[in-house]
Structure formats: C-alpha cells, structure tokens
Image (cartoon, rainbow, N blue to C red):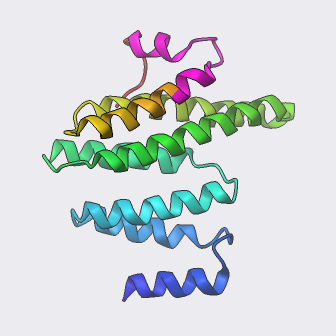
Amino acid sequence: LHMEGLIVRERILGSDNIDVSHPIIYRGAVYADNMQFEQCIKLWLHALHLRQRGSRNTHKDLLRFAQVFSQMIHLNEPVKAKDIESVLRCSVLEIEQGMARVKSSPEAELHTAMDNYECNIFTFLYLVCISTKTQCRDDEQSRINKQIYNLIHLDPRTRDGSSLLHHAVNSSTPVD
C-alpha cells in the first residue's frame, strides 16, 4: 500500500518535483530498520537517480548507502556487487559535478560546495572499503574497478591538495 502511494505521488507531482524523493527515502529507511535491505536499496537508488536527474546535491544520499551497506556487513547480510557498483557510479558522477560546482561557485557558496564535494570523496573511499568485504564474481569486480578507475581518472583533490591515494593511506582519513 505504501509503495502504491509513492508511485501515485510521483506520477501526480512528476519525478522532477523536489518533494518526491523525501517520502521514498523515508520508506526506504523504514525497510532498513526492519532489515528488509533489498527493498530499502531499491527505493534509495530510485530516489538517488531522481535527485541526480534534478541536479540536486546527493552527498547525504551517498553516505546513507555507505551506512546501510556497512550495517549489512556487520549483520552478515550479503551486499550485492551490482548495488555497490551502482552507488559508486553515482558517486563518480556526483564528484565530477562537485568539481564543477566548486569551480563555478560564488565566494559565499564555495565553502558549502567544497564540504559537500569532500564528503563525497570520503564516502567514495568508504564504499570502496565496503566493496572489498563483498563476495562477487570477476565480471562484477571488474565493473566495480571500472568505477574506481573512472574516479582516479578525474583526479579529485581535497582543499589541502590531497589525492585519493593520499587519503587512502592516511590514517586520519574519516572512514567510519
């Protein structure tokens, strides 16, 4: 019944309406709380795609995925490689867009744009760590590696000039 309500709401308001994703995220959280992770991930991926299509910031959405994947690993629930790969792909896109936002932001918005951009870099590293804890076939690992390569190719840097490699080997990098 809740799912039908979400579908009707999206059809009436339109998928580009900013108010559509919030109830989808909430319903996904309810599923996560009830350990129905597959439904949760499906809903959150849908909301993530809606938000990215609308060019809205998704740093909290990406972090939410990292947290639920981490919870699943902690509970010995399997994390699907295709889900990790999908979120990594969205992360690469968001980091690329974040790089553009940082370059084009007016001075008053630069700090927030940089904070969101850096948050996405750290979330990406967190997701890569999680990907090492999942069982996957060679072709799935190859697709995950492709997303890692895509981000390395962009060469994102944090405000102190540190690269992904710097953060990967730095013990003070926040990966919780």
Q: Is residue 130 toward the left or the right of residue 147 in the image?
A: left
Residue at x-position 13% and y-position 46% = 76
* Labels in figure, total: 0
Q: Is residue 44 left or right of residue 70?
A: right
Viewport quadrant of the N terminus: bottom left
161 falls in the magenta region: yes
Q: Residue furthest right?
A: 106
Residue closest to the far left: 76
Q: Does residue 99 sit above or below 70 in this rendering?
A: above
Q: Is residue 49 left or right of residue 14?
A: left
Q: Position of residue 95 (x, y in %)?
A: 61, 35
The answer to if 125 sits in the magenta stretch is: no
Give the camera-side residue of 91 and 29: 91
Q: Which residues are magenta?
A: 150-170
Q: Residue at x 50, y 18 (%)?
A: 164
Residue at 70 percent across and 53 percent down: it is 55
Relative height, residue 58 to residue 100 (above, below): below
Residue 25: percent from left, percent from top: 46, 65
Residue 172 is at least partly visible in this image: no
Residue 118 in view here: yes
In the displayed structure, 11 sits above or below 29; it is: below
- Return the x and y of residue 110 as percentages of the image width and height: 77, 32
Q: Residue furthest front?
A: 139
Q: Residue at x 55, y 58 (%)?
A: 49
Q: Position of residue 176 (x, y in %)?
A: 34, 31
* Residue 175: quadrant of the picture: top left
